[in-house]
Image (cartoon, grey):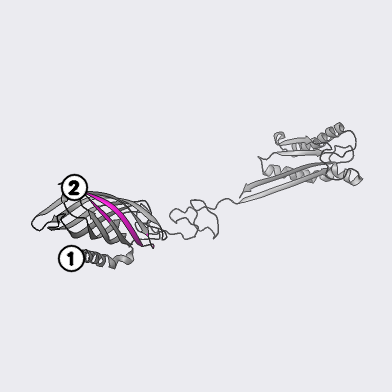
Amino acid sequence: MKKTFLRSAVLAATSLAVVTPAAHAEIPLTLNLGMGLWKNDGSRELNDTETPWAGLEWAFNDKWAAEVLYADDDTRTEDGMGRADIVTWQLGMKYYGGSYIGDAGRIRPYLAFGAGEIDIDYGDADTVETTLNGGLGARWMITQRLGLSGEARMLYSLDEHYKDTLLSVGLNYYLGDVDGTSGAGASDAGAYTFSDEDGDGVADDMDQCPGTPAGTRVDSVGCPLPVTQVASIKMMVNFGFDSSTVEEKYFNDVSELADFLKRFEDVHVDIEGHTDSSGPESYNQSLSQRRAQAVADLLVNEHGIAPRRVEAKGYGESQPVADNATREGRAENRRVMATLEVEYAE
């Protein structure tokens, strides 16, 4: 046990010595070291045993990594009369369900598969078998670089058709990029350096509108998004008693409404006519319609607004804005109104 643990420790230390000088370059390499439990195929007539193991992974991108795995330990035969040294090395791939990039506390489940050899030395006999392996595992990221993993992997002997299982736990230290700016973790496409000179969140090589001012809202290609504005207008025309003639003093108000309609060519307007409560209700309904129509005619005939965009609606005496019991209140109620509000982008 001590001998094999020393072998694994030396292997791990050698691996660490090889990659440490390059660690500052954030190479996408993971160092793995831990303990496992061999569940030997019953036909081998060997007891289950603990084994130290060591490994390395090279990440091609955010999901795929190549790996090498080495384990070495000895165990007794089931009859207790002999011992056997079990050594295995495996080459393969891992497919991760989580990213290298991110904060601590992430869980990265993975599939593992590959091939290699298992060497069992009984002292007076030795067998070397070619194996295929496959397994499931998960890595919990304690920090952005340090992880704790657990795995179950089966090794199938192509020579003897035995099925051995290696259950393992271990520590994993990742030397690659963890910020998403370069290295295997940045994207499936490989290394990438993110440059954004104007700070709008769009990379310079995709920014079609460089140099946007700070704080400007931009679209996916870095161009300013339209700013929504609101334009509104309210027109009020009052009428004399029993009159539907628009007095000259209101011509400017009608003209301003026409200019608004010309500015926003898709806008339609309702011209609302009203009366006071003097006289029969049915007559007031007709009078309010004539008042609304008088203003509509000015918009169409004097200012060239398309008839389809203007609709005159009479409401009679049904919607007073002042007290009909007073002279002043009745004067306020004899009116035509138009109110418009338009949202537009600049």
Image x and y of residue 244, in percent: 85, 37
Q: Residue at x 69, y 46 (%)?
A: 341
State the residue in front, 309 or 337.
337
Query: Seen in the image, is 251 located left or right of residue 62?
Result: right
Image x and y of residue 29, in percent: 30, 60
The CA distance from mark 1 to mark 2 is 26 Å
* Residue furthest front as drawn: 79
In this picture, is 143 found above or below 335?
below
Q: Earlier in the sequence, mark 1 or mark 2?
A: 1
Magenta stretch, residue numbers: 141-167
| Label 2 crowd (10 A; few <14 / some 14-19 / many >=20) | some
State the residue in front, 341 or 112.
112
Give the structural element (helix, strand or loop) at label 1. Answer: helix
Give the structural element (helix, strand or loop) at label 2. Answer: loop
Image x and y of residue 210, in percent: 49, 56
* Residue furthest left as drawn: 124
Labelled disc at residue 246: none
**Residue linked to disc 2:** 162
**Residue linked to disc 1:** 3
Q: Report the predominant secondary structure element of the magenta stretch.
A: strand
Quadrant including the N terminus: bottom left
Marks 1 & 2, CB-CB < 8 Å contact: no
In this picture, is 295 found above or below 229?
above
Magenta-span inclusion, residue 145: yes
Magenta-span inclusion, residue 246: no
Q: Residue at x 19, y 49 (%)?
A: 42
In this picture, is 240 found above or below 151?
above
